[in-house]
Image: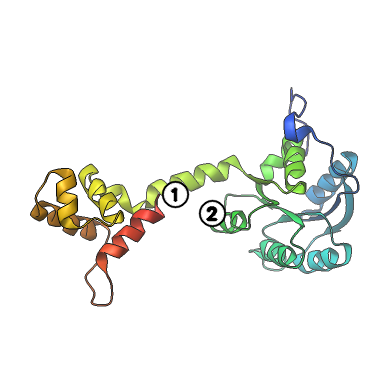
Amino acid sequence: MSIRSSPGAGPITGQDSMTVPKNTRVVVADDDILLREGIASLLTGRGFDVVGQSGDASELLALARVEQPDLVIVDIRMPPTHTTEGLDSARIIRAEFPSCGVVVLSAHVELEQATDLIAQGRGSAYLLKSRVNDVDEFIATLHRVASGGTFVDPALVQELVSARRVHDPLDGLSPREREVLALVAEGRSNAGIGHQLFVSEGTVEKHIRSILMKLGITEAPEDHRRVLAVLAYLEER
C-alpha cells in the first residue's frame, strides 16, 4: 500500500493544525513491513519521534514496556494467528500505560473489535488502512489521539448505524405500540396508559401482549415481562 498526500488537499485547520507536541514518542506495529516502514518514515518527516517498530504482538508489548511511548499505531490482526493479537496487545498497553494513545488499523470493518476499542474512551482511534492513503487526514487523526481525543472511521460509523437498523428489536412495533411501551417505561399502569391515550384498559392490555410477543419475551415465573420490555426499549434509545 502506497502512502501519498491527497490531490488538492488543503492545509489542516483548527485542532488538526496544531503542532505535534515535541518529542511525541510513537511505536508502529504491523507485520506488513512496507506499510510499517512507510508510516514510520512519514511520521518522522512530520515531527513525530518513532522510537520503535514491531512485526508481531509480543514484540510490540516488549517495546511499549521499554519505551513507554505516547502513541501506539497497531494492526488488529498480527502474527502468529492473525486474529486479534494487535488489539489484545493494545488493551494491555492501555491498562499498563493509561495515558498512551492507541490507533488501531484494520483492512476491513470489524464491528465487534471496533466497538470494543470505542468503549475504551479517550485517546483512541479506529481507522481502515485505506484511510492512511490520505496523509493529511491520517496525521490530523494522530494529532487528535496524541492530545487525548478520539476518532472513528466514517465507514465504521455507517456500519454501526446499519447494524442497529437491522437488529433494532423495536422495528416490529406499530407506532401505537411504541407509544404504549414508552408509557410503560415511564412507570405508568394500564389504567394510566389508557387515560393518557384515551383507550380502555383492555385495549392497553392487548397492546402489551402484542409488544411482548413481538419482542420475543415469553412468560417465565422468574422474569417480570414488563421490566424486560422496558429494558429492550431503553437499550435502543
Q: If the image is split into quadrants, where does the N terminus sit? A: top right
Is residue 117 toward the left or the right of residue 79 in the image?
left
Q: Nearer the viewer, residue 80 or 220?
A: 220
Q: Are marks 1 and 2 in contact (CB under 8 Å)?
A: yes
Q: Nearer the viewer, residue 72 or 109?
A: 72
Image coords of residue 221 (percent x, y): 23, 77
Residue 57 shows in the view: yes
Instruction: Say above or below: 2 vs 225.
Output: above
Q: Quadrant of residue 138?
A: top right
What element does badge 1 sit on? helix
Q: Residue at x 22, y 55 (%)?
A: 211
Upstream in the sequence, badge 1 or badge 2? 2
Residue 1 shows in the view: no
Mark 2 closeness class: few <14, some 14–19, many ≥20 residues within 10 Å: some
Residue annotated with mark 2: 111
- For residue 154, the mark is none
Q: Nearer the viewer, residue 89 or 57?
A: 89
| Residue at mark 1 to residue at mark 2: CA–CA distance | 9 Å
Image coords of residue 42 (percent x, y): 85, 41
Q: Callout 2, which amino acid?
A: Leu
Instruction: Say above or below: 219 vs 183.
Output: below
- For residue 163, the mark is 1
Q: Callout 1, which amino acid?
A: Ala
Q: Residue at x 78, y 69 (%)?
A: 58
Is residue 182 toward the left or the right of residue 61 in the image?
left
